[in-house]
Amino acid sequence: METKENLNEQDSLKIINEMIATAKTSVSDNSFHYLLWGWLVLIASGLDYYLLTITHSPNHWLPWPVLMGTGGIIALIYSLFQKRKEKVKTYFETFLGHTWFSVLVALFLTAFVGGRFGGQIAYPVIMIIYGMGLFVSGMTFRFIPLIIGSIICWACAAAACYVTHDIQLILLGISVLSGYIIPGYILKLSFKNGTV
């Protein structure tokens, strides 16, 4: 009885590592969200850049609500189907769920502020917020591509403070490519190969 109640340090670390591995597998299997949002933001920023600089359309911002709204619906449907298959939710998954929910709220509020005071302010803040979510996820699961992606997001955010709106769109594209799309494919490949 005493041995069951008093786990030694090695057993405790083994249990913690198994929990992290289980959650890591679950998150890596869920690379869908990184890829979905990465591609949608990359496409939206590319279309915004094209409409702003090439066609000089006053409605250059339209790809954002269309693509982000579509992404929200797709992500919600996907999440509902995933919940049905889910047997156990780990502490780490719950923690990351709360983290990304707060990131989502911060992004909506930033979009609101950007609409009120101008997009020039919003894009650097959006990249900072992206970077925070990526950094927390990367550190939680010790996944280096997400950590590197977060640092690139922050560097792009800093650079975006000194450039015009059209160049900010390019920096936003670079940040999601390095923070979402590339790590998303690495996660997907790692899960497929069983190396996570």
Image (cartoon, helix red, strand yellow):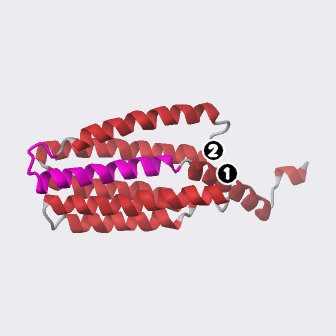
Furthest residue in direction right, as rendered:
1
- Give the mark nearest the N terminus, 1 or 2: 1
Main SS, magenta residues: helix
At which x and y percent is residue 91? Answer: 60, 46
- Dot 2 alpha-carbon crowd within 10 angstroms: few under 14, some 14 to 19, many 20 or more: few
At which x and y percent is residue 82? Answer: 57, 36
- Residue 157, quarter of picture: bottom left
Evaluate if marks 1 and 2 touch, with contact meaning CB atoms under 8 Å apart: yes
Q: Is residue 51 left or right of residue 41?
A: left
Looking at the rendered structure, the kind of residue marked 2 is Thr
Residue drawn at point x = 51 percent, y = 62 percent:
139
Looking at the rendered structure, the kind of residue marked 1 is Thr
Furthest residue in direction front, as rendered:
55
Q: Nearer the viewer, residue 193 or 54?
A: 54
Residue 32 located within the stretch drawn in magenta: yes
- Residue 148, quarter of picture: bottom left
Q: For the residues marked 1 and 2, what is the alpha-carbon distance in whole angstroms?
A: 8 Å
Residue drawn at point x = 38 percent, y = 37 percent:
72
Element type at marker 2?
A: loop
Q: Which mark is residue 22?
A: 1
Query: Magenta stretch?
Result: 31-60
Q: Is residue 173 left or right of residue 6?
A: left
- Residue 166, quarter of picture: bottom left
User: Which residue in the structure is indicated by mark 2?
Assistant: 90
